[in-house]
Amino acid sequence: MRLRSHALTGGAATGAATQGSTAAISGRRLRRGLADALAALVPPALVALLYGSATRLFWLSDDFYNLRYVRDWRPAQYCLDPEVWQRLPFRMLTPLVFVSYDLDLATFGWAPRGFYLHELAALAAAGVALHALLRFYLPVGWSVLGAMLFVLGAPIAAAVAPMLMGRHYAEAMLFVLLAAVAWIAGLRARAPATGWALAVGSACLWLLAALAKEVAIPFVALLPFFLPAGPPDKALRRLLPHAVALLVYSAYRRYLVGAWFGGYGWAVEGTDRLKGFALLPGRLLREMAGGSSPWGWGMVAAMLCCCLGLAVKSRRAAAILAVAAAAVVLPIFPVAAEVVARYAVAPWLALVVAFVIAAPRVRFGRWLAMAALVFAVVANRQAWARQLGALERQSVENRALMSLGRGDVVRLPTGPPASLEELHRLTSELMHRESGTWYLDEIYLCAGASQPRRLWEYDAAEGRVVDVTSRLPALRRAHCDGIRGEAPLAASFRYDDAGVLHWSLGPWKDGVWSIVLRDGVDSYPVPAQAAFRLGLSGAFPLRVRYQSPAGWTTYSPVLRLDLAPGGRWAWRRPTTPPRGSS
């Protein structure tokens, strides 16, 4: 009986200890789950706090074109019909951005607020997905820091949160992060069937990311670096669905676009390729820092210090960082002639991930992390104030143009020329009337074009477009009388078989050059020597404008180019430079 009693009491004690251990484990899991749930609320709350004011903006930039395109064509047409897709003015494959606009148009109609709410929701979801990815490897504090830094980034503030045309960057990053989460979860799954299902799901998510924006394609190359400890054979086999997805993407691109590769905008050629590639990292870092902001550069410096510190400590880490840098920078090279904020979104995500993984592993990493967060907040507020102010002005001008009518002209609006053309076209098609018009160069007042019945201009103090018709004679005298018609000027153009227009402007080394179309209605700042993919044919009349650092301006006469493959044109006005010129 004693032995039995001892065994029973010992068993009871063991059972009580097991129950206590199970309860402790359950408690830890509950606390971890609660901490993760609360942490997942941080990115949406931060997005709402930082960028909620974007919902009062109007249609901007490419929005008018995108809206007209999805109004004219159904998803089945632009996703499956090459003839419909190739009507677009680029050779990229981004059908998901149009599907996204289509979904919003069906849900919210022509009210932009709903579109902006969708934009911010996609950004917030990307922040949550980044937190989930980092949580596989880091404590909750570090994963939240990574999500916060991503949302705070200057590229997000400048090109994603306030601009619907940046939607495909937000959604591409969301899908690529979810793909990584699914793949890692599949590797950790105990049941092989579950692991393979998650691997297939990861491949599908990565394919969606690639169809949102092509910068997401190389991210699949980073998945092998998330392999767990042990033999990698099993994990590498789980990449087979991604290989299939890549073949599907390649075939689909060739079918829909008609080319394996392609681009748009500025063309980088000859020796400029090497120069552009050499300058590209610095230009991307500048966009990540928010331009010339010392706070932004302080943040980038702190992050790079941690990454370099880890690279010095570990050869494997150095190799991973090098591959990651190549994966996010190389896809941007075809458009490296002009680096804008949205091009830095993918590199910014990669830098954030590298930083929060490196910081806990290097000396002073925690202090650098605190500094980076503080600097990021200040740099974000600076970048947001600049961008929101500029976009609010553009919103006011666009609303005014859509409400004004025949004979009303807005002076020097800030919207891109192509966007203004689409605004005019969409107003005519939707409202069945003419919108107001505009001019982007004051030569409009001198070139003998039909003069405005009423002239309007944005007033920063009042935050609206006001009638400045009374100033029209003074504006005309100030600009037209000051043109230096005798100043030397030269221009040569060449149009190649690929639809790229090359030009060289001179003889001045400094100053600002522009290509002016339609007697000043449209104007494009350009470098003195460059090339741009036009893809047009036929008559293309233009003026060349040069503005000296001393303040004077001169124009060429209208140069009538007839765009055809192999076409060449040259014009020059050699005279004695005006006095006081530079």
Image: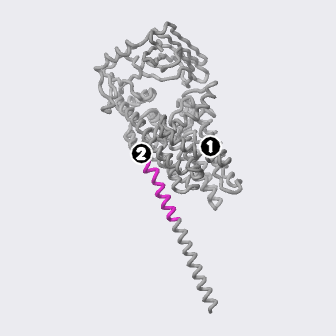
* Residue at 34% across, 14% down: 477
Residue placed farthest to the top in the image? 575
| Depth order, front residue of 429/375 | 375
Instruction: Label 2: state its secondary structure.
Output: helix
Looking at the rendered structure, the kind of residue marked 2 is Leu
User: Which quarter of the figure has residue 246?
Assistant: top right
| Residue 542 highlighted magenta (yes or no) | no
Quadrant where the N terminus sits is bottom right
| 375, above or below 575, in the image | below
Q: Give, as a single range, the part of the protein colored magenta.
A: 29-47
Prevailing secondary structure class for the magenta stretch in the rendered image: helix
Q: Position of residue 82 (x, y in %)?
A: 57, 34
| Residue 50 badge | 2
Instruction: Label 1: state its secondary structure.
Output: helix
Residue under numbered circle 1 = 324
| 137, above or below 507, in the image | below
| Depth order, front residue of 265/298 | 298
Q: CA distance from mark 1 to mark 2?
A: 29 Å
* Residue at 35% across, 23% down: 409
Residue placed farthest to the bottom in the image? 1
Q: Earlier in the sequence, mark 1 or mark 2?
A: 2
* Residue at 31% across, 18% down: 472
Tag 2: Cα neighbours inside 10 Å, few (<14), some, or many (≥20)? some
| Depth order, front residue of 44/307 | 307
